[in-house]
Image (cartoon, helix red, strand yellow):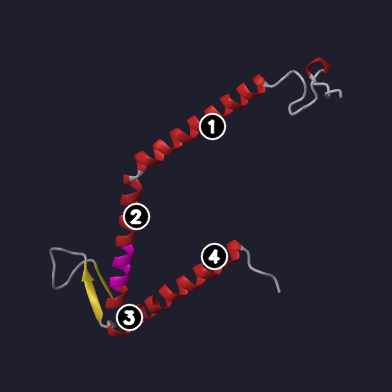
Amino acid sequence: MTSAGPSGGASTLRKIVAAIILVPLAVVIIAFAVANRQIVTVSLDPFSGGEPAAAVTLPLFVLIIVLLMLGVLVGGIAAWLGQGKWRRSARSLEREAGELRTQLRTLRHAAEPAGHPGDSTLPPRLQLKPPTA
């Protein structure tokens, strides 16, 4: 048997939380659909109430669920458009950070000694001799 690592435990917890939320939500949606099976006619013609030129006939729960999904979609688009300045700012800052990383890498490379980077051998004149007793 293998032990689950940190990401395995989080994944299991996420699945449990999703099940705790999604199962009751599905039960509520199914109960709503069963309770609202009446057929309704949605008229898209504002001028003719009796014989509309454009009308759709469907169960009430379908209409409500479609309208909810449409509302979520419109709200998501509005939020995405409203966050445009923050995304633009983040892209600009990420580009600037990349340029600064490149400059830092160049400066570090220029500051390295003439030998190989990380070479810890010093020339003989800079080495300390052990004390003599």
- Magenta-colored segment: predominant secondary structure: helix
Mark 1 surroundings within 10 Å by alpha-carbon count, few (fewer than 14), some (14 through 19), many (20 or more): few
Mark 3 surroundings within 10 Å by alpha-carbon count, few (fewer than 14), some (14 through 19), many (20 or more): some
Among the two numbered marks 4 and 3 on one chain, the one whose residue lies closer to the N terminus? 4
Asked whether the residues under the numbered discs 3 and 1 touch, taking CB atoms below 8 Å apart as contact, a structural biologist would say: no
Q: What's the residue type where badge 3 is placed? A: Ala
What residue did someone put label 1 on? 98
What residue did someone put label 2 on? 76
- Say if the magenta span includes residue 47: no
Q: How far apart are the two marked residues, 1 and 4, measured between alpha carbons?
A: 32 Å
SS for dot 2: helix
Camera-nearest residue between 87 and 39: 87
Query: Which disc, if any, is residue 33?
Result: 3
Q: What's the residue type where badge 4 is placed? A: Ala
Q: What's the residue type where badge 1 is placed? A: Gly
For discs 1 and 4, the disc positioned in front in the rendered view: 4
Among the two numbered marks 3 and 2 on one chain, the one whose residue lies closer to the N terminus? 3
Asked whether the residues under the numbered discs 2 and 4 touch, taking CB atoms below 8 Å apart as contact, a structural biologist would say: no
For discs 3 and 1, the disc positioned in front in the rendered view: 1
Q: In the rendered image, is residue 105 in sight?
A: yes
